[in-house]
Image (cartoon, rainbow, N blue to C red):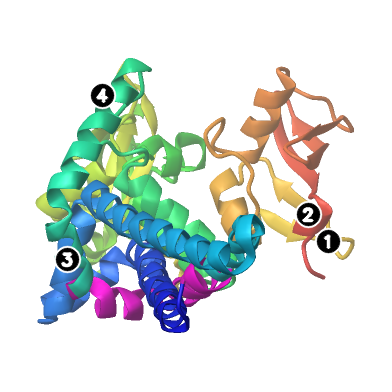
Amino acid sequence: MSETSILISVGSVFFLLIFSGFFSGSETALTATSRARMHALERDGSKRAGVVNGLIEFRERLIGAILLGNNLVNILASAIATSVFLDLFGEAGVVYATLVMTALVLIFAEVLPKTYAITNPDRMALAVAPLIRIAVFTFAPVTAAVQFIVRRTLRMVGANIEDGAEVLSAHEELRGAIDLHHKEGGMGSHDRHMLGGILDLRDLEVDDVMIHRKNMQALSLDDDPKDIVEQVLASPYTRIPLWEEDPDNIVGVLHAKDLLRALISHDGDPTELDIKGLATEAWFVPETTSLVEQLNAFRRRKSHFALVVDEYGSMMGLVTLEDIIEEIVGEISDEHDVEVKGLRPQPDGTCNVDGTLAVRDLNRALDWELPEEEAITVAGLVIHEAQTIPEVGQTFSFYGYKFQVLRRHRNQVTAIKITPPRKAQVAE
């Protein structure tokens, strides 16, 4: 082989390596690019973003064309290099060609372009999309044949190769992205909980966020009207259920504004008030209603308050629009709210909590990861795991946390000391 031929061959190898790097980097960029950002750019008028979205939409065809092009140039470059080294070093040239081409392909055709692509996926995807579209169109017949063979082979071994089959649902994909950004430090805990709360609305039911009947404030129609007015004025709530004869017999909901208007119209004399007549009709909803359904129902009815019943029609508690919104944005307090003292962090990193504190609220407050599916309250979680109603002083360990029962009233666990894992210790 003449010197000129060798130079041409070496030049061809480096030219092919550039193409190999192009295909490798393009594959990484187009698979790692943010689909949400590409859709936003396309909506803003970016034609290249539209090309990227078109390529990603048919991912199997895209990957097939890129792999075909990459393998073609790599094999051709290796063949040319082997020919040159055989001419220069004889049979030992095969070994030299293998070592040299492995190093060149690994560094300049794989690691280097993929490293750049993974750090700048959107920029590179927009840059290479037009050329890759040409490659996809050119290799379309070959990639179609390859896909046919691959699908037939996978069906023979029972693999799931349905068109458009998704491993994760859209909600799970979003939740995974949120957790990943939080773990990498790109998102704060509050933002993570807020975005996660939106996704959780379909999974949570009203009984997960309702105020239990035991903690409800209700008014008895058997009381003197003056006492009822005083109770309403002393209450932090503007809507209060009314019951008659039996606490389970809710006959309406009294709004503080309606009561005050009526009181003014009667010159401030509460004895003249028809309390039952001022109440609006109570709205009852099943405990199994999802939060997103209840939120939509609140919007349709232009109401903020509903009473929750079980499948037998028995009173379970109440749910408000604020309860649902708090699942997204966290606790909302105003100047009339009563502070709930259910969480008491200790200097040693442990935490004393009321048994009625919701597990979800505890996780949000301290960025813990206790399971929220097994029970609503911390006491319920301890009882579920212990499979018994524990005694005062008993200690249980599960999910990496230690729970010690501090107080118990009859069959209700009222106070618990929690020792978290070291990585989740509460800051002093």
- Judging by the rendered image, the residue that carries numbered circle 2 is 351
Q: Is residue 119 magenta?
A: yes
Query: Magenta span covers which residues?
Result: 107-130
User: What residue type is disc 3 on?
Assistant: Arg
Mark earlier in primary sequence (4, 2): 4
> Which residue is pictured at 38% across the width and 40% down the height?
204
User: What residue type is disc 1 on?
Assistant: Gln
327 over 128 or under it: above or below: above
Res. 122 image quadrant: bottom left
Q: Nearer the viewer, mark 3 or mark 2?
A: 3
Q: CA distance from mark 4 to mark 2?
A: 58 Å
Q: Are marks 2 and 1 in contact (CB under 8 Å)?
A: yes
User: What residue type is disc 4 on?
Assistant: Arg
Mark earlier in primary sequence (3, 1): 3
Mark earlier in primary sequence (2, 1): 1
Q: Is residue 312 magenta?
A: no
223 over 381 or under it: above or below: below
- Judging by the rendered image, the residue that carries numbered circle 4 is 152
SS class, disc 2: strand
Look at the image and tell me whether residue 193 can be seen: no
Q: Identify the disc placed on residue 133.
A: 3
Relative horizontal placement of residue 119, taking residue 422 as reference (left or right): left
- Decide: few, some or many residues near mark 2? Use Cα within 10 Å; few <14, some 14-19, many ≥20: some
Chief secondary structure of the magenta span? helix
- Judging by the rendered image, the residue that carries numbered circle 1 is 346
